[in-house]
Amino acid sequence: MSAELLPAFAILVGPWFASYRHRSTTAAIGGLLCITALLVAAYVTPTGPVGIAATFKSRIAADDNVIFIGGYFFDVAIVLDRHSPTYIVGDWSKRATELPDNIRRQFTEGREFDSKTSSKCVDRTFCAAVNR
């Protein structure tokens, strides 16, 4: 449910809840469910790229190459505490003005502004060279 619907939901449900004879019990159960959900969310292991990065952080040395394929995940770079640049695989043949406003365009603008950074935006042939 989106945040815009909450006031309307409260207006609809509020009178019913105020007249409900077990409202104290219902409010206590709802509060306990919210606290339980908060505790579970705090202790659940993150999934996706961030979870994978946290799991393998101890195996990745500071001088290892980190390569993002198919996108760039800011959280992963933060979890890995990288002090050296990461490589980003993609199609970098288009100019920034030809791309929609997204992260790829921002990296392309960076490449056009500072040619030294263009060595970190690579294509798939780089991956093959690194794997040899």
Image (cartoon, rainbow, N blue to C red):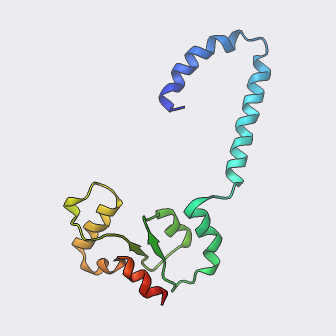
> At x 55% / y 72%, what residue is drawn?
80
Count how many numbered circles sit on residues in the image: 0
Considering every residue shown, the one lying at the far bottom of the view is 132
Q: Nearer the viewer, residue 47 or 8?
A: 47
Residue at image coords 72%, 47%: 39
Q: Nearer the viewer, residue 48 or 93?
A: 93
**Res 12 quadrant in image:** top right
Q: Residue at point 28% right, 67% down?
A: 108
Viewer-closest of 51 and 129: 129
Which quarter of the rendered picture does the N terminus lie within? top right
Taking the spot 73% from the left edge, 32% from the top edge, the residue there is 31
Left or right, 123 with reference to 16: left
In x, y percent, where is residue 132? 48, 90
Q: Give the quarter of the image for residue 15.
A: top right
Place of residue 23 in the rendered image (x, y in percent of width and height, measured from the top left): 75, 17
The answer to whether 17 appears left or right of 128 in the picture is: right
Q: x and y percent of residue 40 in the render?
A: 72, 48
Q: Going by the image, does 92 lie left or right of 14? A: left
Q: Give above or below for 42 relative to 116.
A: above
Q: Quadrant of residue 25?
A: top right
Note whether 76 is above or below 67 in the view shown. Answer: above
Residue extending furthest top?
Answer: 19
The image shows residue 127 at horizontal and vertical percentages of 43, 81
